[in-house]
Amino acid sequence: MGGHRKVGILGVGLVPFDKYEDVLVEDIARPAVIAALKDAGLARDDVDAAFVSHLYQGEVLGQRILRGLRFPEITITNIENACAGGSSAVREGWLSVANGEHDVVLVIGAEKMGRGLINFVGADVELTLGNTAPAQYALAARRHMHEFGTAPETFARIGVKSRHHASLNPNARFRDRFSLEEVMASRPIADPITLLQCCRNGSGAAAVILAAEPLCAERAGPKVWIESSALASWMADKEQRDLTSFGATRVAADAAYEAAGIGPEDVDLVELHDAFTTGELLHYEGLGLCAKGDGGKLVADGDTTLGGRVPVNVSGGLLSKSHPLGATGVAQFCELTWQLRGEALGRQVEGASTALAHSQGGTGLEAGATCVTILNRG
Amino acid sequence: MAATIDRDPADLVTQPIWTGLMGADDDGPYLVGGTCSACGFTTLGVRDICPDCWANGTMTETPIGRRGVLYTYTVIHQLPQGYDEPFAVGYLDLDDGVRVFAHIENMQPSLQIGAELELTEATLRMDSEGAALSGPRYRMKPGGE
């Protein structure tokens, strides 16, 4: 990214995901903003602009959150990119600092959700015919099973891993461990996906403070930098495409690796979009953590478990934290910042210096957004 | 115009799940496709603008989807509104180069990727007022794999 300023993560704040049934979304979000600013050692008057991600929270959410904290008349942009909205907001904030538009930017992701399957607003013919989010991931998984001989148990093992990681993370919502047999025997949702292989709906918020290099250099302790961020779209309009490469993960990852001047072998840990276990496996391959078709081997060898070669979703991921749509992508940056600072007590990836955040979202298997961001400890 | 399926008066409560999705002629039910008279590109449904060559108003209705090859499938157990039992769905690759999402007659374990399927019209679910909604459902061709 020639000509760009170096941008660091100066502070993070998380409101751990839960139900929050009797709390307004603005009230859910505000403690995350306060925590991030406190972590950064900054005050509200230091913030030049805010980028705010949500999906179903109505108009000008950012303004509604921040007026209740008596922010001045700063630039606020509200962002929707389905479940990749949070990471897209971080990326927009990063770009605005990198390009010199702002020096200090606040990124917020916040969502308040009810129960059950997501009710997409823009109903297309597939959704009308009964397609669901888990079915989309099941359809991709079934094709992967057909082409590469992947077993249903392989996907289920990712569910076991998720709860193992979550049991170590006090910020995770579902922390009970489960055996492979229990995951396999849980209620069927869409073959081969069972209940314990699905993320739950959730409510919550996360906030990140991004700043230009000079401010970040003043911060005591380890520094966390954003090396690159790439956003790609998948645009399959009733075409006969390969669904085992789910979404635009490969395109976004290749662009992010190239801009950071690294390859997948340089990544020490990953937070990726595990809305369903099958998605996590397909994204291993899309991110280049293994060769195409070898995702199952990565799981079997424990490579993506804490202590393995490249731990994935040490936070517990969406599967164990639940998934407040617009907040999810921002929360990944909270976890990765703690990891890169060496502050992830009980679940620390030792010696972590390069991390990758991946999230994606869309409706159906035809249109969506995928964002990949590379972070570095320096 | 799409030919519409003649209904027995007793079936009048059945409505199409998506207006304009299906038609029928002497060869049986079909999906309503659009083919661009300028470039030949084919889509599911008739679009105003051809997605490929961007010509406006050149797409004309054409029957597609009488047969397809199963690309992938699943059985949905967590039911969306209007369904009362698990149902199979999949993506089918049609000869016209189009891939469609559709219901499939649930015939596991014989259902296999690569199976050749043919189109039928069937009741898929109920709407919020209890009326039956009909739409495309594929099944194995008689004598097929």
Image: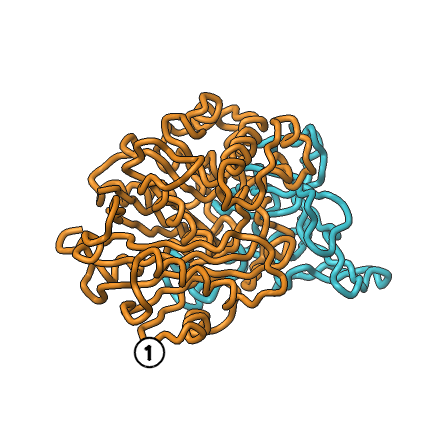
Chain colours: A orange, B cyan
Above or below residue A239? Residue A78 is below
> In the rendered view, does A340 fall on the left or right side of B103?
left
Whether residue A37 appears in this view of the structure is yes
Tell me the quarter of the picture where residue A14 sits.
bottom left
Q: Position of residue A169 (x, y in %)?
A: 49, 40
Residue at the disc numbered 1: A73
**Which is more toward the observer, A242 or A350?**
A350
What is the secondary structure assignment of the residue under circle 1?
Answer: loop
**Which is more toward the observer, B118 or B128?**
B128
**Which is more toward the observer, B6 or A67?**
A67
**Which residue is found at the position 25% from the left and 58% from the top?**
A211
Q: Position of residue A40 (x, y in %)?
A: 31, 57
**Which residue is found at the position 31% from the left and 35% from the top?**
A352
Above or below residue A374? Residue B15 is below
Tell me the quarter of the picture where residue B38 sits.
bottom left
Tell which subunit mark 1 falls on. Answer: A
**Which is more toward the observer, A277 or B81?**
A277
Which quadrant, please, contains the C terminus of chain A?
top left
Q: Residue furthest right?
A: B10
Whether residue B41 appears in this view of the structure is no
